[in-house]
Image (cartoon, rainbow, N blue to C red):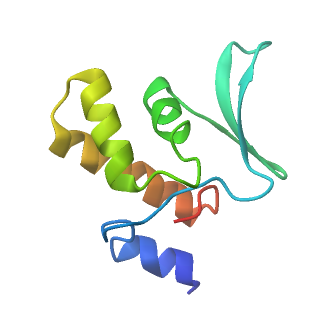
């Protein structure tokens, strides 16, 4: 089992200071033709919803998971605990697919 899968299964990203970023070759792009956001990687494509876009736009290689959660909680005036769980779940799922580096 690779380290990314093991880390995701054991709750990677829950430690303080994890800085998510899109790996080389992966990018978030709005497809004008389809009218939707896509996460593009070599030979892979993932359609992402508005919530995922809000999270992924903040994965700049500088902001920690905690900073992303705090920013989203403030921007959307939502429960921080719910946002935290959603952010970690999405990032862990994408890390398993090697679409996000944690």
Judged left or right of residue 50, residue 14 is left
Who's the residue at 26% across and 48% down the image? 84
Quadrant placement of the N terminus: bottom right
At which x and y percent is residue 78?
Answer: 19, 28
19 up-or-down from 28: above or below: below
40 up-or-down from 14: above or below: above
At which x and y percent is residue 52?
Answer: 48, 35
Who's the residue at 52% across and 57% down the image? 20
At which x and y percent is residue 100?
Answer: 59, 57
78 up-or-down from 60: above or below: above
26 up-or-down from 74: above or below: below
Judged left or right of residue 101, residue 80 is left
Is residue 69 visible in the rendered image? The answer is: yes
Who's the residue at 43% across and 49% down the image? 90
Is residue 88 visible in the rendered image? The answer is: no
Who's the residue at 51% across and 66% down the image? 102
Q: How many marks?
A: 0
Judged left or right of residue 29, residue 76 is left
Q: Considering depth in this image, is 25 or 65 the residue closer to the camera?
A: 65
Q: Considering depth in this image, is 66 or 4 the residue closer to the camera?
A: 66
Question: Residue furthest toward the right?
Answer: 43
| Quarter assignment of residue 27 | top right
Question: Residue furthest toward the bottom?
Answer: 1
């Amino acid at each position: 089992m690779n380290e990314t899968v093991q880390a995701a299964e054991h709750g990677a990203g829950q430690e303080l200071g994890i800085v998510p970023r899109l790996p080389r070759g992966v990018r978030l792009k709005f497809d004008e033709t389809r009218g939707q956001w896509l996460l593009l990687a070599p030979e892979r494509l993932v359609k992402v919803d508005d919530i995922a876009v809000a999270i992924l736009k903040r994965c700049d290689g500088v902001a920690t998971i905690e900073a992303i959660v705090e920013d989203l909680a403030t921007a959307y005036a939502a429960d921080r605990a719910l946002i935290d769980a959603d952010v970690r779940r999405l990032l862990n799922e994408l890390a398993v697919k090697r679409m996000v580096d944690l």
